[in-house]
Amino acid sequence: MDTADSFQVVCLDTSHYDEIMALWRRAGLHIRPEGRDSVEAFTRQMRTGVQTPIGLRAGALLVAVALATHDSRKGWINRLAVDPDYRRRGLATRLIGLCEAHFQAQGIDIWAALIEEWNQASLALFHSAGYALTNDITYASKRSHAGV
């Protein structure tokens, strides 16, 4: 079995949109193709310079991806996904490390991820990567458009 270090690191861009979406579907992520995950939204987010998709490939196949985003003071690891056929090989942990290195290179030294309470695997992953888990924060959101 391949180790996480044997997979090729790739910086992705808008030309990889379909490939990223296909991986998110294989991984079971909830996707909003008419809203925040549309090609238009993805392109707009890339254009701002605050979103960097980082991926891992097994040959030509994209098998893991995370969106490294920031608000200029805090780095956010978003939409981390690993193909089900490639799980339990350390790919998610490697992606976290790659995102952290990306943020450090930009002078951002606070890193975070929002994880849904039911997602025990992701909670355990980030805890094992040294992230402090807290239950004293409530996430509040407001959307200007339904379905975004």
Image (spheres, rainbow, N blue to C red):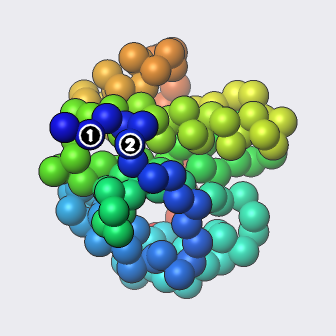
Indicate the amino acid at tag 1: Asp
Is 29 on the left or on the right of 71, as rendered? left
Residue 36 sits above or below residue 87 on the image: below
Between marks 2 and 1, how big is the CA–CA gap?
6 Å
User: Pointer 2 and pointer 1: residues touching (CB < 8 Å)?
Assistant: yes
- Give coordinates of residue 132: x percent, y percent: 51, 15
- Give coordinates of residue 146: x percent, y percent: 43, 74
Q: Which residue is drawn at 41% across and 18% down?
A: 127
- Give coordinates of residue 10: x percent, y percent: 53, 59
Is 84 on the left or on the right of 90, as rendered? left
Disc marking residue 6? 2
| Quarter where residue 49 is shown | bottom right
| Quarter where residue 47 is shown | bottom right
Disc marking residue 2? 1
Instruction: Between residue 61 and residue 117, name the one nearer to us.
Output: 61
Q: What element carries label 1?
A: loop
| Dot 2 alpha-carbon crowd within 10 angstroms: few under 14, some 14 to 19, many 20 or more | few
- Give coordinates of residue 60: x percent, y percent: 35, 69
Q: Which residue is drawn at 24% across and 66% down?
A: 25
Q: Would residue 137 be seen by someone viewing this image from the given angle?
A: yes
| Quarter where residue 76 is shown | top right
Instruction: Between residue 16 and residue 1, name the one nearer to us.
Output: 1
